[in-house]
Structure formats: structure tokens, C-alpha cells
Image (tube, grey):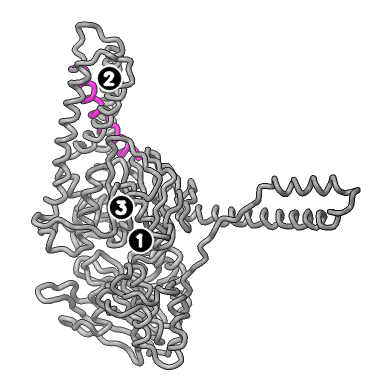
Amino acid sequence: MISIDDVTVAYGGFVLLDKINFHISETDKIGLVGRNGAGKSTVMKLIAGIQNPTSGHIDKPSGITIGYLPQIMDHNKGRSVLEEAMTVFSETSGLEKEIETLTLQLGERTDYESPEYASIIERLSELNDRLSIAHSEPPEVQARKTLLGLGFKDDELGRETSTFSQGWNMRIELAKILLRQPDLLMLDEPTNHLDIESIEWLEDYLKGRRCSLLLVSHDRKFLDNVTNRTVEILLGHVHDYKVPYSKYLELRAERITQQTAAYENQQRMIQKTEEFIQAFRYKPTKSNQVQSRIKALEKLERVEIDETDNVRLTVKFPPSTRTGDVVYKATGLCAGYPGKVVFTNADIEIKRGEKVALVGRNGEGKTTLMRIIAGKLDPIGGESRLGHNVDLGYFAQNQEDELDKTETVYGTLDRIAVGDIRTKLRDILAQFLFRGEDIDKRVGVLSGGERARLGMAKLMLQSHNVLLLDEPTNHMDIKSKDILKQALQNYDGTLIVVSHDRDFLDSLVDKIYEFRDGAVKEHLGGIQDFLSRRRLENLREIERKEAVCKPEASKNEAARLEMKEKSKLDRKKKNRISYLECEIEKLEARMSEIEKVLSAPGPEVDIMELTREYLERKRDLDAKTDEWGSLIE
């Protein structure tokens, strides 16, 4: 579908991408991976036509639609959330107009066997497929479903977009892209502003969507669940693997191992051959053998080991002092801001050595609680207190507010470093991938990932026995996240972390506080246990169809009502499947009749009318087949 052919991108003497080649087909769901700065976002901009290559070219079929979500984008204002999402449906009128134009062309043509005629038929089929999807449900229903799936509440859909943060406006733009149903989806870090439940909804959507996908993400689980192919950008070159991310890591390690073994064997053979040549070069009786081996070496195809990027983030938190048994306790806590209460009546207790995650929808109070614990915000009501001998280290989500933009990278650490540690600042910065001239950069020109790493380096200069980390892995590449996770697992203090990254939290935390609908609920166990429980709760809510059991009803009665409701749904489902199967059979029969007529139309046949009927029935057939497929899963 799309071919990237010998594409090079260079800036002055620096080559970012060096004659890269790969192809995106209609069924590919590709994870584009590589460390920060490798060129992943650049590849997306090239395909989207936002940036031109220094050399090479990108072939795209005419008429292809591309939905591109960059990391940073402008947002529209002046409409409500729902109104802004609905703007995409104005595009369907353009599809209908093109269908009408092409149908008229078919009625006028008589070259039924020509490639041009076949091309028009193919384009009409493609447009009708797209229109069929767009008309499968009323536009407002589609828009509401998508916005709710991405985390909006129903009563928020009428609010103006300007009243939401940049992260929430990014969700609106993502919803618009998904509603357009493009041929190719290109998503650059779509999960950065999504909470865990929204990420899971997006996963399910992308797995079920029949389109090409090019995805940049630092979420290992998201990549594994959504993609079927991995394209790695490494030191300006691409390496293509037809497997998801975790399997790619295994195959890559196996390939390097095999290459290394083959290289070492070949080097031993070359050394022995060269020793033979050197030993018998001047002996007439061996001259033929010597010449033969010289020629063999010249013709030998040398084994090479793929280049690897061994630069890695190495983090080790310094030992911490001992706190009291209870590190933080809140009783009846009420928190928020002027004019807005975020959560109420929260009871929270965090003990020494615990590793605790705060999870939930954005805006429910996770960062608010972190700021209260850090002493940067006063609670509205209730009690909030730190335990004995607590020394807090706070990593804020927005490093722009915490770091001085006018200061240099080196100066940021130099200003707070004391004692012997000042002699090791360059080594510390090197651990966080700031090397050479990087340490003289101003903070204001750093990328999001660089600011995150600098903020973490700053946090490590002092020994804290309690760490508050608010979205520490945003913009970090997968290698960096893995090393940071390992360091936190070995950290001997207490950890309180806000994160939507399931892979990062998995096997790291042992307790979770969920922020939901103005309340805070404690869950013991890891992130996978929590997600399993949440899925079960959601499933029960769906099966009950919002039927509410009376408080005095017994557990058996509640179970009986639930089974009754489920049986009713099963009967309706079976009846609907039978109806759809009957309708599908009728539609297929009529379409088969029309195909026979159109294959050899007589002079009395109205080709334009028959084609219109065929395409309408195809649209109806596709919609009913999709519904049938969803019901039998």
C-alpha cells in the first residue's frame, strides 16, 4: 500500500535516516520502535507529507486516507466536545458526491473489460465500504461511544473544548481520527494522556479495526496487544520483524547471538588461513595452495554483526534512612481547588517499604493527592499527615514547571549539589544520556523525554526515603523505563507512583488506590489483579443493563435477577442472529443476480440503476455481516 524507498533524512552533516526501506500493507499493524531521537516521529511526518526527505521517495496510492495523531498538535475551540467530534461527519457528504460522480461515469462507459472500468468499480466499492461504516450507526451514537471509550463522562460532552486540558483535547482529536475510519492510522504516543481503562478501550478498538496501523508507543503491553509487526529504527537504519514487540526482542537477541557465533567462527578460519599463507608464502611446493587460499579470502563474504545501540540509562537510587511505620495517613480527606471538589472522604494509609500506585481517570485527583502529600496543596477538609522522619523526593508530572528553562542541564544539578557529589555530576548526567555538548543545552530546548530524565537525575542527588513519582515514564523510551523500573524495585524506601503504564507497574507495586467518581478505593495486590477485578465489575454492570437490586435483596436474589436478565439477552441475541442470517442470504442472492447481468449487459439494461442497487445492497450486506460477526463472537 505505502512504500518507503531509499529514504534519507539529513541535517547538515548529521544523517538521521540512511536510505531506509520498508513497506506498509493493508493488514499491517506496525510498532515503530527505537530510542528517543532515533527518527520515529520523523518517519510519520514523512508519510503524512508534513516533511520531505533529503533523498528517496515515498509511494502512496491515490485516494488513500491517513489519520495522523502527532505528539503535539493544535486544538480547535468554540465548540462543545460532542460538536467538535461530530465535525468529521461532514466529510461523508464528499464521499456521497464522489460515489454519484463515479456511478454516472459507469453509466456512460461501454468499455466493460478495460482496466479503467475495473478501477472505477474498485473505487466505488471502496467508497461504499467506507460509507457503510459511517452509516452503520447514527453519527451522534458513534461519536458518543468513541468519546466515552476514551474516558469522557456523558455530562462532559456538552462542555466547551477550551475548558479541558491539553491532554483531554488530545483525546478529542484522537476520537475525530478514529471516527474518520482512515485507511492508515498513524498514532505517535497515543497513550501518553490516557488512563489505564481508556488505553484498554483503545486496544480493543485497534484490534478490531480493519485498517493499516503505524504506532509509536513506549508501552510494551500496548504494542504486544495491538501490533503484528515491529520495525526498529537503529542508528539510522531499519530492521523489520514480522512479530509483536516482545517476540521481536527474542528474535533480535537470537539473531545477534547467531551472527556473533558465525562471525567468531569465520574470524578463526580467516586467522588460520592467513597463518598458512604467511608460513608457506615463499615455498615453491606450496605456491598453488597459497594462491588458492589468497583468492578464497578475497572472494569470502564477510559475516557482519548488526550495529547495536548500547547506550542505556543506568539508575541506582542511594540508600535511604528509616522512617516510622506509617509514612502517610489521611482520614476523611477532601481535596480539590477553588470551585471544584475532586474527591471526598478518602481514607489512605501508606506504610514503610510499600510500593503504591495511584490509578484512575485523568482529573479524578491522583496528582492532587500527590501535591497534598508533597505539601504543595492544602486539603479542603479531613486530616492529612506525614509519618516520622519522612524525607520526600517529588517528581512532578510537568517538569516544565519544576525546572528552570533558562538554566543549562549541568547547571540544574550544580545548583543543588553539595559536597563530593559535585565532582561526579558529569558521570551522573552520562547515566541519564546527557553526554558531551548535551550538558550545556538550555532546559528550554530539551524534549519531553530529556526533561523527564533530567528531573530524575535531579531527584537522585539526595537520599530520599519516600519517592513521589507523578508519571515518571512519560516520553521515556522502553529501555529507559525498564532500567528505571529495575532501580525502583531495588529501592529500599517507600514509593508512591502515578502511572498509566501497566507494564511499568506490573511486579513493581503491591497496593493500589483507585480514584473514581469522587471517591478513593484501596485495592491490595498488583496491577494485573486490579485490572482483572475491574473487568469483572464492568462485565457485571453490562449484563445487568443498569438494573439495580434493592439493598435489602439477598445475594441469591441478586444472582437470580442477574441470570434472568442474561437469559433474556441471550434469547434476543439468538433471534437477532437468525434474522440477520436470513437477510444476508437474500442480499447475497440478489447481488449474485445483478453480477450476472452486469457481466454481459444487454441494450435494454439500465447499467447505472443496476450498479446503484448493487452498491446499496452491498452496503447493507456489509453492515449486517459485521453485526452478525460481532454477535457470534
Residue at 32% across, 68% down: 448
Q: Which amino acid does label 2 sit on?
A: Met
Looking at marks 1 and 2 on the same chain, the residue that comes earlier in the sequence is marked by: 1
Snapshot quadrant of residue 71: bottom left
Residue 531: image tag = 1
User: Which of the image's four quarters has the N terminus?
Assistant: top left
Position of 93 relative to 38 (above/below): above
Looking at marks 3 and 2 on the same chain, the residue that comes earlier in the sequence is marked by: 3
Name the residue carrying label 2.
Answer: 591
Name the residue carrying label 3.
Answer: 202
Question: Which stretch is magenta?
Answer: 609-633
Position of 79 relative to 606 (above/below): below
What distance separates the C-alpha of mark 3 from that of mark 2? 35 Å
Residue 269: image tag = none
Element under disc 1: helix
Snapshot quadrant of residue 404: bottom left
Q: What residue type is labelled 3?
A: Leu
Q: Which amino acid does label 1 sit on?
A: Leu
Residues at discs 1 and 2 in contact (Cβ within 8 Å) = no
Residue found at the very far right of the displayed protein: 285
Residues at discs 3 and 1 in contact (Cβ within 8 Å) = no
How far across and down, in percent of the image, does residue 62 sit? 29, 35
